[in-house]
Amino acid sequence: MKKRSKFEIMKDILQTVQNNPDIKTTPLLRKSNLSTLRFKQYYEDLLKKELIKETENKGKFVNLTEKGFRFLDKYKTILNFIDEFDL
């Protein structure tokens, strides 16, 4: 199996958040298929880059920001470009 790139991992985490609004961090960790340490690094990076946000309401929940939605949209555009030109 091919190792995922940094951008693929970021995209996978963001898509999981998009498909599971108000997801908690533990289920997100499980769905990310990363070690706890690697997940924490990516999670903190996504927070710092303001692609995801945490909200607290009887627990900590994770959601995409507008910037996170734009990242996913641009990522899809890049993949379509690569496929279209067989790069």
Image (cartoon, rainbow, N blue to C red):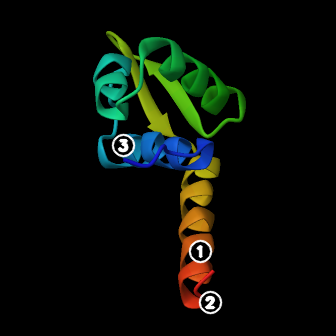
- Mark 1 surroundings within 10 Å by alpha-carbon count, few (fewer than 14), some (14 through 19), many (20 or more): few
The residue shown at (60%, 78%) is 82
Residue 81, quarter of the rendered image: bottom right
The amino acid at mark 2 is: Phe
The residue shown at (55%, 30%) is 53
| Marked residue nearer the N-terminal end (3 or 2) | 3
Nearest to the eye among marks 3 and 2: give it: 2
| Residue bearing the label numbered 1 | 77
Q: Secondary structure at mark 1?
A: helix
| Marked residue nearer the N-terminal end (1 or 2) | 1
Q: Tell me: residue 72, above or below residue 30.
A: below
Would you say 4 lies left or right of 67 here?
left
| Residue bearing the label numbered 3 | 16
- Mark 2 surroundings within 10 Å by alpha-carbon count, few (fewer than 14), some (14 through 19), many (20 or more): few
Q: Nearer the viewer, residue 27 or 2?
A: 2
Structural distance between the alpha carbons of marks 3 and 1: 19 Å
Q: Position of residue 29 (x, y in %)?
A: 36, 23
Would you say 62 lies left or right of 85 here?
left
Structural distance between the alpha carbons of marks 1 and 2: 12 Å
Q: Tell me: residue 2, above or below residue 17.
A: below
Query: CB under 8 Å between callouts 3 and 2?
Result: no
